[in-house]
Amino acid sequence: MDALIVIFATGLLTMFIAMTKKPVLVLTVALIGLLTAVGLFVSQWYAPRNLFNYDGLLFDQIAIKFSVLATVLAICIILGGFSYLSKEKEHSGEYISLLIFSLVGALCMIAFTDMFMFFLGLEIMSIPIYVMAGSKKQSLLSTEASVKYFFTGAFATGVFLFGLAWIYGATGTFKLEEIELIVTSGKGSSGLLEVGVLLMLASFLFKVGAAPFHFWGPDVYAGSPTVVTGFMASIVKLAGLFAFMKVFTFMFHGVHELWANALYVLVMLTVVVGNFSALKQSKFKRLLAFSSIANAGYALMAVMVFDVNSYANLFTYVLGYGFSIVSLITISVIVDQDEDEISSLKGIGRSNPIIGIAATVALLSLAGIPPLAGFFGKYMVFASAFAKYPVMVIVAIITSGIGMVYYLKTLMTILGEHDQDTVITKPTVLHYAVLAIATIGSVIGGFLVF
């Protein structure tokens, strides 16, 4: 809880410091605050001592692990995107503070113990992203992204609240533990409960971008500023998937067959739609959007098969995926091409070997090539699901093979002959630092967790 307060205070402080129009000062304060929060999280691993406590939030060891990863990814996104954010010197500080506030919401979605706190976390995380998605005022695509994300997000939130009302009617409480006891014992109204569970399932599928509720993703990812796209693809995705697992595998474990049967079909649909749609993309961020949809489907397999290793499986998966996204978004920031064509990346890896190595590791990790973190994530998720859902795992493996096509195609573009017409922004020290952190995370992260 102390770390969360530090991050919130950092957001407030950076918002006021932003008025000085000194982006470097804002960045320095943000880094100090976020690194302090990471230190507090780590110090509470074995000896949880908090100056402040609140019953609606519980940072146990599992929550701490995901919170540290989310905070580290946020640090990388802010550092890697600083050159992009500081182009508008008057607003760069506000961008950083909004990202930090959104991180606060994501951490609330990780540590919540009642559904009221989850709803607050969801809105705290989403509202800054609604604003930032449309922050490129000169771009109609950015405006479209903001409007689409707002309306689809508001609709999904409405469905969630409607489902939560049915759950409350069946159980009479918002607390996770109390709902779990009532659902497991069968004391709640079964009709109300089942309707509420299915409505909440639909809302969560919206939030993580799973098919057939994925339609907002490509346009929002493509139209948003590159840094915001990276934040949505990594931190927002991580928080949504963790909350999905926490609600359905713990709170609704007693009606597992009800929601798992529906999710069984939707997971296969998601990995098929995501991978086949990505094959024909020529825009880099749209490619990442459909890749994100496919990866949401793979990660949801960990939710369906809940056992003692499920949280570890999900953590390994989002670790490999998150660091890969950080590398690719940083490379996109370095290229800084408004049209966002994949062809604009041509030769960047050959002209700059550091970028080439980072891109190679990131794309191969997303493709699930051993011994990178992405491979360990897929292996652990697939292995845990195979005994109970062999057909689903076979479909996932086949579509994962299809995914290798567009990942390797993009990699060959990056490592190809340099196009003399392509103008590449000179990478900064911050870019190199982020690429190094993300590459190391993708290379050794899987080994450490495994």
Image: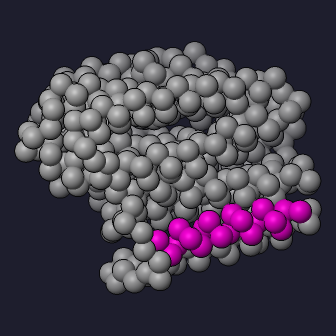
Q: Report whether 124 appears left or right of 203.
A: right
Give how far across and how far down residue 220 sits, in percent. Answer: 64, 28
Q: How is the image coloured?
A: one colour
Q: Residue at x 69, y 63 (%)?
A: 11
Q: Residue at x 61, y 52 (%)?
A: 102
Q: Magenta region's main secondary structure?
A: helix
Residue 295 vertical placement versus 240 (above, below) = above
Q: Report whether 441 appears left or right of 298.
A: right
Residue 60 is at least partly visible in this image: yes
Give how far across and how far down residue 261 sits, in percent. Answer: 20, 24
Please name whichever residue, 382 or 297, is drawn nearer the observer in this view of the structure. 297
Q: Residue at x 81, y 66 (%)?
A: 16
Which picture quadrant has residue 204? top left
Residue 296 vertical placement versus 235 (above, below) = above
The image quadrant where one finds the C terminus is bottom left
Give how far across and how far down residue 418 sits, in percent. Answer: 78, 35
Give how far across and how far down residue 247 sits, in percent. Answer: 30, 45
Please name whichever residue, 389 or 9, is drawn nearer the observer in this view of the structure. 9
The verdict on residue 10 being magenta is: yes
How many callouts does the rendering have?
0
Please name whichever residue, 190 or 150, is drawn nearer the observer in this view of the structure. 190
The verdict on residue 295 being magenta is: no
Task: Please report the bounds of the magenta region as a residue range.
Answer: 1-19
Q: Report whether 304 appears left or right of 348.
A: left
Residue 348 is at least partly visible in this image: no
Residue 53 vertical placement versus 339 (above, below) = below
Which picture quadrant has residue 63? bottom left
Q: Residue at x 39, y 61 (%)?
A: 56
